[in-house]
Amino acid sequence: MANRMILNETSYFGAGAIAHIVEEVQKRGFTKALLVTDKDLIKFGVATRVSKLLDDANLAYEIFDEVVPNPTIAVVQKGVAKFKQSGADYLIAVGGGSPQDTCKAIGIIINNPEYADVRSLEGFAPTKNASVPMIAIPTTAGTAAEVTINYVITDEENRRKFVCIDPHDIPVIAIIDSDMMSSMPASLKAATGIDALTHAIEGFTTKGAWELTDMMHLKAIEIIARSLRSSVRGEAAGVEDMALGQYIAGMGFSNVGLGLVHGMAHPLGAFYNTPHGVANAILLPYIMAYNADYTGDKFRAIAIAMGINGAATMGLAEVREATINAVKQLSKDVGIPATLREVGMKEADIDALSEAAFADVCTGGNPRDTNVEEIKQLYRSIY
Ligand SMILES: NC(=O)c1ccc[n+]([C@@H]2O[C@H](COP(=O)([O-])OP(=O)(O)OC[C@H]3O[C@@H](n4cnc5c(N)ncnc54)[C@H](O)[C@@H]3O)[C@@H](O)[C@H]2O)c1
Ligand SMILES: [Fe+2]
């Protein structure tokens, strides 16, 4: 079997990297951008750093700022209409996973209009054409949507969040500029940072993992374990490290898949609008414990990457326990709640949540095969 890797064509890293947008746009001959973002990022002056660059260079653009967290089908359709009306020929996404995912769906539908209903893009839709060229600029350090071939859309009518996996959506250019992330409040840095840790741990233990992605996931775990606390404290070096760590995790998981943490987190987003990173962070240590016996010696590698003392020589059971505890401690130190009750989950919804989690495209990658009954027990035990 051959393994496939898909990554950005060009990516830039480091504080101030957004300055490279201008030369890239000019070199590629793009004429007008639709800048996809959300209202808070305009209000906080984050997205406007990019629009100012475009203004200063006399580059034409229009703004679509109607993205909401856990973006919906209706938002995507509004964005498609806006793109058509604007006369743009490329996309710039400025934001966390929500604006980036919305932007990907817009770019795909513009060039594959038979998917205008959005729902039919769920899973592995066989689109024929590459997206409208997209420049992705993350403002959170978590989802790595700028380097993944995935996007996640919420179907409000059916109370579902669905994942779309399509190599045609890969952003041509990613600009990972930690200055675009430093305005995140501590709670957002924490939640999105644990999302990135979840990508790295699930990507490392997922069924399709292989040596090349192992290298990426272990490096991401090392960087995130070392830097998330200092990023949350507001230290610039920590924010810059997290920007890189989350991207490296994305290089890996995008190409091999995730697992049950994401499978169970998506329904929480659909039912209660739970922030994606918070849902993952609460679930992660419990699902690690559920999977531990199906991961061989991988938790030892995670423990070593996290810098746990004595990890190399501990017994297997001991090193697994130490790894789960270190993940719990990290979440606790950055202020993540410990139970699903605290984020509004209702016991009466457990059956429906479990059906949705079992059907989620991420669940198939989990190292331990699961079923609806076991997922119900897991939701109950984390409630
Ligand atoms: N495409 C992928 O591969 C992938 C992977 C994981 C998650 N996701 C999806 O991404 C979404 C979550 O994205 P997210 O966690 O990045 O958050 P988000 O994009 O939903 O943003 C959350 C909030 O943070 C604010 N915000 C963002 N950046 C900020 C900054 N620099 N300063 C101040 N406020 C800022 C936004 O305005 C918004 O109100 C979910 O829908 C999730 O399912 C996608
Ligand atoms: Fe995620």
Image (cartoon, rainbow, N blue to C red):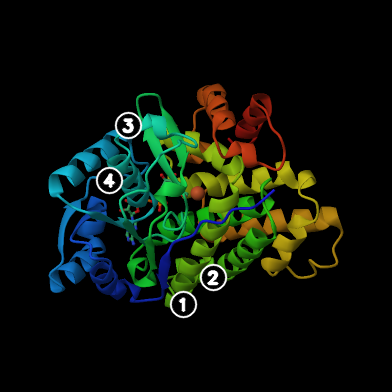
Q: How many marks?
A: 4
The first of marks 2 and 1 along the sequence is 2
Which disc is residue 227 wearing? 2
Say whether mark 4 is within 8 Å of ligand 1: yes
**For the residue labelled by badge 1, is the local secondary structure a helix, a strand or a loop?**
helix
Residue bearing the label numbered 4: 67
Q: Residues within 10 Å of mark 4 (few under 14, many from 20)?
A: many
Residue 4: x and y in percent read 59, 53
Say what secondary structure mark 2 lies in.
helix
Q: Is residue 309 above or below residue 360?
A: below
Q: Which of marks 4 and 2 precedes in the sequence?
A: 4
Callout 3 touching callout 2 (CB < 8 Å) = no
- Residue 141 x/y as whole percent: 44, 61
- Marks 1 and 2: in contact by CB < 8 Å? yes
Q: In front of the other: label 3 or label 2?
A: 3
**Which-is-in-front pick, marks 1 and 4?**
4
Q: Of the residues tagged 3 and 1, which is closer to the observer?
A: 3
- Real-space Cα separation, disc 3 to disc 1, in angstroms: 45 Å
- Indicate the quadrant containing the C terminus: top left, top right, bottom left or bottom right: top right
State whether residue 358 appears in this view.
yes
User: What kind of element bears circle 4?
Assistant: loop
If you read the primary sequence from the N terminus, does the residue marked by circle 1 or circle 4 appear first?
Answer: 4
Question: Mark 2 near mark 4, Cβ–Cβ under 8 Å?
Answer: no
Which numbered disc flags the more N-terminal residue, 3 or 4?
4
